[in-house]
Amino acid sequence: MIKKLINTSAGSVKIDWERIESYLGFTIHNNIKNFYSRIVVDDKRGFKGRMKFVREKFIIQMGNDKYDRFLFNNGNTNDYDEKGNDTYYILELLSSNDLEDLPKKFEQLFNMEIWQHIYNMGKRVYIGSLMHKVGDVSLFINNDSGVFEWAYLQDKYQNYYDNPNGIVAYNAHDFILKLSNKLE
């Protein structure tokens, strides 16, 4: 499935973005449009995949040592395999059922229960998660900047609105390539 996502160009799924933006009351960043307009999956839960997780290739170092070094094996910097670890992921893509009411679907994606009542995530769309050795690591696209971000949502008092834990990619193409382990 990841090969199909890589090889299918943005815009392959025809989506009336103006209708969705009118319903939501704000403009959706082009990276979100790029990510969601590639393929439609049959399973409404998205799709699962497996990658060889190498922190230095997956995470963009931001100069915050706590989070730049966080995704080691079990968070322990002495227990890190530079060749990578098998890591599973789930991507929340559009399903054929979602196409029936895309404005409502995007309202749900921007207002996921996970942060609506616990975390203030700002205008971010939840796109999936990594099942990493440290636990479930959530993946988002920031609607203001278009950046693909990650957050380890364990501290309900942390301010994720302005500062998620880190950045994975600056565009959909690089994000998808990182999941496939093809980005050099």
Image (tube, rainbow, N blue to C red):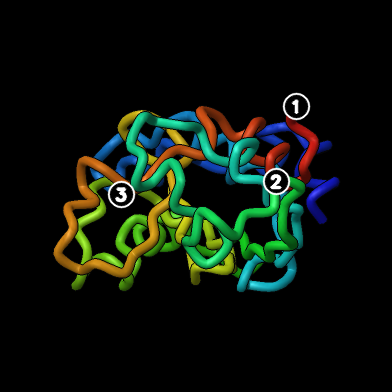
Label 2 sits on a secondary structure element that is loop
Residue type beneath disc 1: Glu
Q: Quadrant of the C terminus?
A: top right
Q: Is residue 31 left or right of residue 159?
A: right
| Residue at horizontal 52 percent and vertical 67 percent from the top | 74
Residue 141 seen in this snapshot? no
Q: CA distance from mark 3 to mark 2?
A: 46 Å
Residue 23 bears which disc, if any? 3
Callout 1: few (<14), some (14-19), or many (20+) C-alpha neighbours within 10 Å?
few
Residue 184 bears which disc, if any? 1
| Residue at horizontal 14 percent and vertical 64 percent from the top | 157
Q: Nearer the viewer, residue 88 or 92?
A: 88
Q: CA distance from mark 1 to mark 3?
A: 39 Å
Q: CA distance from mark 1 to mark 2?
A: 15 Å
Label 1 sits on a secondary structure element that is loop
Point out the frontmost of discs 3 and 2. Answer: 2
Q: Nearer the viewer, residue 110 or 181?
A: 181
Point out the frontmost of discs 1 and 2. Answer: 2
Task: Say if mark 1 contacts mark 2, CB within 8 Å.
Answer: no
In the image, residue 145 lies at what x, y percent? 35, 29
Callout 2: few (<14), some (14-19), or many (20+) C-alpha neighbours within 10 Å?
few
State whether residue 43 is above or below residue 91.
below
Which residue has dot 2 on it? Answer: 82
Residue type beneath disc 3: Tyr
Q: Quadrant of the N terminus?
A: bottom right
Q: Nearer the viewer, residue 52 or 149?
A: 52
